Image (spheres, coloured by chain):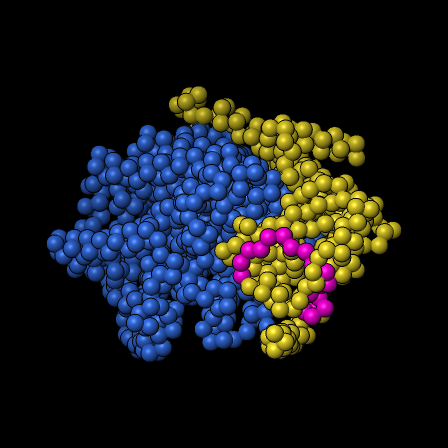
Chain colours: A blue, B yellow
Amino acid sequence: MDFLDRFAVPNPSIAIYASMVAIGLTVVAIFAGLTYFKKWGYLWREWLTTVDHKRIGIMYLISALIMLFRGGVDAIMMRAQLAVPDNKLMDAQHYNEVFSTHGVIMLLFMAMPFIFAFMNYLVPLQIGARDVAFPRLNALSFWLFFFGAMLLNISFVVGGSPDAGWTSYFPLAGNELSPSVGTNYYMFAIQISGLGSLMTGINMITTIIKMRAPSMTLMKMPMFTWSSLVTNLIIVTVFPVLTVALAMGSMDRLFGTHFFTTTNGGMDMLWANLFWVWGHPEVYILILPAFGLYSEIISTFAGRNLYGYKSMVASMVIISALSCLVWAHHFFTMGQGPTANSFFSITTMAISVPTGVKMFNWLFTLWKGKIRFTVPMLYSIGFIPLFVIGGMTGVMLAMSAADYQYHNTMFLVAHFHNVIIPGVVFAMLAGLTYYWPKMFGFMLNERIGKWAFWLLSIGFCLAFFPMYITGLDGQARRMYTYSEATGYGALNMVSFVGAGIMAISFAIIVYNVYYSVRYSPRNISADPWDARSLEWATHTPVPEYNFAITPNVASSQAFWDTKKKGHELFSGELEKIHMPNNSGVPFIMGAIFFVWGFSFIFSLWIPAIISTIAILVCLVLRSFEVDHGRYISVKEIEETEIKLRGVN
Amino acid sequence: MKLKSVLVLLVFTIITVLTGCEPLMVLDPKGPQAKRQAHDILLSIGIMSFIVIVVFAILIYVLIKYRASKQSPDYEPPHIEGNKWVEIVCVGIPVIIVTYFSFVSVQSNYIVEAKPQGYQDKEPLVIYASSSDWKWHFSYPEENIETINYLYIPTDRPIEFKLYSFGPITSFWIPQLGGQKYAMSNMVTTLNLAADEPGEMMGRNANFSGKGTAENMFNVTAMSEKDFDKWVKDVKKTAKPLTEGQFNKFLKPGHLGQMTFTGTHLDFSPAPEHHNSEPTKSEEGHEDHSQMEMSDHQGHQ
């Protein structure tokens, strides 16, 4: 019994038991469905073993959307708890678990796969490549992310969720103050998916540097590809810091080391420093691809080339460099003195300059344009004013002396949601709507999409602007309740209503997918938005090999040149195309990593050793495996091309 | 400078009106440090609002003027690469604003970390504020008294808080006197505050420290020096001495009401003032010591 006790949830509640049942039923339903429709083979051949960047991108996308709903439910629970003073909906422990998982899921298991979805799908298409540089590594990245996410998600039904905040500061996250396995889940789930992110970083940089169509110089790359390149450079710079910090934290918790303990020479603030050395660049890892998507969308729907292409590139490079020099602004109040604070205060404010340049470039792209208000464009236009407000409060927070009053308050919570939601979430929804026809061959309904946009924007303002005020009125963050005397009640109720409206908006987006699957016309062209960059120059649906002939580009808007200036993109004869083989190893390795993480989380040493060996065996086998890929013959290409041209 | 104060006053008025006349805690300062911080906050809101308004204006203008429905169907937007002068302006103005903010920020950093302005010639009252799950212990070494979860301070005298923690990292915050500073278990941080006028204020731990964070608050009462001296005398007359056994019981996780003692825990459990290697030893020593003391105590009974 003692052995099984550790898997029990330490703080059970009805909601958790209900979720257990729901998860169980869903798993049974999925298995039954797959068996009934005889789809096991299809699932394995076409998806689980795929190394196609487009399919991997779509799998990232689906995972991100599912995680968005998981994180969103957490958010609604928090706002409901705080809607009225002295609320008894949740106790402190439950609330702590909810906000900790909300943060981890939204940043690492929603936003990260969302940007990887677009990078995977778009980068090879935008540079005229057949796939990424290391297709099998790419599959491994995805499966590591996926099983990392699953690991964190089972925490609340097996053993208990992390409850020390998404920042997991030591010594609170240490064994003494967090004895449950929750923080172990945090360490290993993020570690596993973080390894995946690091591999994606290496993969994408190599792809962009080495696999561009020969005619595409760096300054002819579409802006999203530029943003991906800069983002992945940040990823390979800072993710190793996270890997090391998590490894140290795991050793503290499992093997009694003293990196972050407060006794025996440990330093609790070392964790905070390492965490934010990764954590601050991480927010730029999320926002730069979003900026890339906005650049593509604004330019398309303004009907104009992107204004100030060179300064856009320069500003991203400057942002990426500065992003690694600002981490201490997350704890100006640590007591490091006015000199250190002044340094980090100035570097932080300096980031607003290149960001401002980008903002003005988007505005000047609209200038003299011919603006069409489609759903992706509405998100991009809504982003500008909301993000400027978020940026303004960001500069306020950067003033370190004043930050002593904002730190750990709802003001801060309002600020980072104000940059992440209009910045990242809007971009993802804009990108989703914009690239949906390319991915799935039909468009999402515009009218329903506009409803979702307006409700989301209004809900966002109602949910987060009141927090600026309660923050200045002394409401600290991460408090599960407050008394009536504080007077925070009314504004928190407004926030709850706003969160409710946002939830409705997300429900409408889901409905829109359902509606469009059923009723949207399928006979759309390959270029439904009158777009400009190279990814639109191929067929819809995109053939496996992307482009039958490697394109010959003249500028960053290669497709526009073809349409308006008669530039010839594809010339020459068809040749056989070399493609990578599918492989089941990445999926199997991901599953073994899941077992590996689970074993460490619960200190099950025998399975831990076995799975470690199994991982090593997979690596060794891969090294000795001879796989030269396969060729698609000219005849096959011709058949596919004729078929696709017929569709359009 | 006149322009600056007009701006600060303007923003303050707007915010006060918007939030229903009751001033927000942070913008209702009762001491010089909080005043400086409120000034910085209002100043930055004022200047940044200007940028926000400019961006909004440009955005609305281009959206109305260049929307497709207003243009002839054969209008073809021009290809514009960018303009050196436009870029210089877009970089230049933010650089000027950020430079100005940097000056203000650096200056304020040194002001809020130093002895409060207007109190330079006065001897500070040293108070050790230490947190344990989930309460605050205030030790007045000079007066040789200790309180739990409430703080009495004299006006017209700077207060030097020495902060540390018996558990997770906490953040000591009295919004109306000045912003936060962390309390950690292996070092002591210093926060200089002062109260200009008598009154009651809210103080709390602002950093998440586990289950009891929400209730980890304390009351602050600022009073004239005369009243403060009288309170100290009363405490000495009425309160019981703090024993080590009692104190170790207080350190256990939980909540306590307000309590008052003579003597401070610093006598038997000194603050980790020389950080890094030494506190380790002293802490371990202290643990052994307290166990000895406990058994000693039981022996007596």
Q: Residue at x 35, y 68 (%)?
A: A6
Q: Position of residue A435 (x, y in %)?
A: 34, 43
Query: Measured from the top left, where is residue B25 in percent x and y?
Result: 64, 39
Based on the picture, tell me whether residue B113 belongs to the magenta stretch. Answer: no
Visible residue check, residue B146: no
The image quadrant where one finds the C terminus of chain A is top left
Q: How many marks?
A: 0
Q: Magenta part of the protein: which range?
A: B253-271
In depth, the one of A96 and A522 nearer the eye is A96
| Nearer the observer, A269 or A66 | A269
Main SS, magenta residues? loop
Q: Residue at x 50, y 23 (%)?
A: B65
Farthest residue toward the front? Answer: B301
Q: Determine which quarter of the picture holds residue A646.
A: top left
Q: Residue at x 57, y 39 (%)?
A: A486
The residue at the point 43 percent across, 45 percent down is A88
In the visual, does B273 lie left or right of A133? right
Where B73 sits versus A345, above or below?
A: above
Residue B181 is at least partly visible in this image = yes
Residue B232 placement (x, y as % from top left): 77, 53
Quarter of the figure with the N terminus of chain A:
bottom left
